[in-house]
Amino acid sequence: MDDFDLLRSSWPEILDTLKKEPVLTSVSFNSWIKPLIPQKIEQGELFIVVPEGMMAISVLNKKYLMLIRVAIEEVTGLSLRIRFVAPDPSVKDDAKESREENAFERAHLNPKYTFDTFVVGNNSKFAYSAALAVAEQPGEVFNPLYLYSGVGLGKTHLMHSIAHFILENDPSKRVLYVTSETFTNELIDAIRNRNNQALSEFRDRYRNIDVLLIDDIQFIIGKESTQEEFFHTFNALYGAKKQVIVSSDKPPRELDILEERIRSRLEMGLTADISRPDYETRMAILRKMQETEGFRLGEEIMDYIASNITSNIRILEGCFNRIKAKSLLEKREVDLSIAEDILKDFISPEKERRITADMIVDAVSEHFHLTREDLTSRKRNSEIAYPRKVAMYLCRELTTDSQQAIAQILARTDHTTVISACRSIEKKIQTSDETKRDVDVIRKKLNSGV
Ligand code: ADP
Ligand code: MG
C-alpha cells in the first residue's frame, strides 16, 4: 500500500477526528472540510481538491490547514505538506466529474494511460485494435482478452486505456484493475483472517463487477491457492458474460506451470501480442512525448535515442526525461555530446551496433560450417534444420523484424515456422548445454562484430 492508498482509506477516520475538534463547529465542518477530495501525493505534498473553489481555498489556508495536517498525521502517521486546489475549471458538471474521478480512482487507473496517448505502430496495431474493440463492447466480442509482450512495451498502458474508455462511456460500470500481486496479497489476507467473512468479501469484490483486468498474470503461476481462486473468479465472471482482460509476459501455452484447465480458459478468447517497436514507431513515441511534455529534444538527439533503445519504451521515456531534467536544471540546451554522456548508463557502446537478419544468417552459416544457400534451401535434414531454427531464434531475439520478414529471409513461406522454431530453440536452451553454447557463441560474435 503506498502513502496515498493509506491516506485515502483513512480519510473517513481523518474526517471523524476533525469533526470532534472543538474549534470546528458542525457548520464549518460541513461547509469546508466534508467536501474535500484528496487527489494525490507528490513529493511529500498532498493535493486536495476543493469543490467549492477559490473562496473556500483561502478560508482553508487561513484557518484549517494546521488542523487538517495534524489530524492526518495523528491517524496515518504521515507528515505531509498540503496544497488545496480548485477543480478543473474546464469541466462544467462538477458533480459528474467527481463521480467519474471516483470511478477512475476506485478502478486504480493512471490518468496518463489512455488510448489517446498510446502511439500505434506495426508492432502494436493488432493489440491496440483488439483492446479498443473490447473497450467498445465489453463482454461481447473477445472474452477473455489476453495481451502479452516483453517488459515496457505497453501492456499496462493498454489495459488502463480500456478501463478509462469503458468508464468514460458509462461511469456506473464496475471496473477493477489489479496487478496479480495485489490479487494474490488480498487473497492471502482474506485466507489468513481465517473467517469465512473475509473470504466471501474477497469473492464479492472480484465477482460483482463488470470488467476485471489482471496485470502480469505470470506472477500467480505456481501459487496454488491463488491459481485456484483466479480460476473460480474467471469462471464466475465469464459465465455471467463479464469481460476479463489479462496480461502476461508470454503467450498462454508458454505459461509452463499453469494448470491445463486454466490455460485453455485463457485461450478461449483472443490473444494479442505487442512486439518491439520499429525505428519509426520509436521516433513517433519520442515526438509524442515532446508534445505532451512541452519540451523539445531536437532531431539529432531523438535519432540517437531511437537508434539505440530498441526493446523497452519505458527506457526510451527514461532517456527523454533525463535529458529534459538536465536541461531544465542547468538552464541550457543539451547537444548530442552532452546527451551521449547523460545516457551512457542506458546506451553502452557495444549495444550501438545494430544487428541485422543478414548478419545473423551469415554468422550462423559460419558457425555451423554451412553456406547461406544451405540455410535457405528446402532441405529438412537435421544438420541444416537445426541451424536454420537457431537463425530464426536469433533474428527474433536480436532484431525487430516481424515473423513474416524473418520467414522471408530464410525463404520460408509461412511465418508460423518462425514461431515453432523459436519455441523449439527456447526449450532446447533449457535442456541442452550444446544448444545454449551454440546460441551464446553466435550472439557474442554478433555483438562484438567479429
Ligand atoms: P508493460 O506493462 O508492457 O511493461 P507499460 O504499459 O508499463 O509496459 O509501458 C511502459 C511505459 O511506456 C509507460 O510509461 C507507457 O506509457 C509507455 N508506452 C508503452 N507503449 C507505448 C505506446 N505505444 N505509446 C506511448 N507510450 C507507450
Ligand atoms: Mg505492466
Image (cartoon, rainbow, N blue to C red):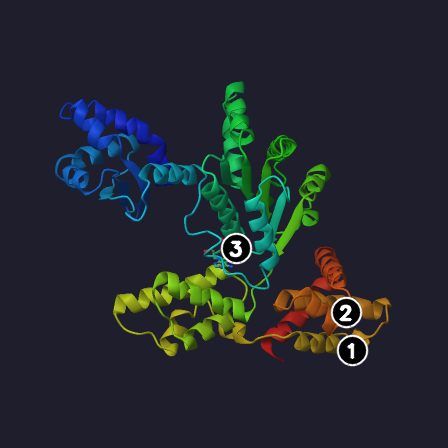
Is any atom of residue 195 visible in this view? no
SS for dot 2: helix
Q: Residue at x 86, y 71 (%)?
A: 379
What crowding class fits label 3: few (fewer than 14 Cα within 10 Å), some (14-19), or many (20 or more)? many
Q: CA distance from mark 1 to mark 2?
A: 12 Å
Q: Nearer the viewer, mark 3 or mark 1?
A: 3
- Vertically, is 200 above or below 328? above
Quadrant hosting residue 153: bottom right
Picture coordinates of residue 362, whole percent (x, y): 71, 78
Quadrant where the image shows the C terminus: bottom right
Picture coordinates of residue 149, whole percent (x, y): 59, 55
- Vertically, is 319 above or below 83? below
Give the labeled residue for mark 1.
369
Picture coordinates of residue 312, whole percent (x, y): 52, 61
- Vertically, is 218 above or below 400? above
Give the labeled residue for mark 3.
154
What crowding class fits label 2: few (fewer than 14 Cα within 10 Å), some (14-19), or many (20 or more)? many
Residue behind label 3 places its C-beta within 8 angstroms of ligand 1:
yes
Task: Kindly identify the amino acid type of the residue bearing the numbered disc 3.
Answer: Gly
Nearest to the observer: residue 97 or residue 277: 97
SS for dot 1: loop
First in sequence: mark 3 or mark 2?
3
Give the labeled residue for mark 2.
388
Q: Are marks 3 and 1 in contact (CB under 8 Å)?
A: no
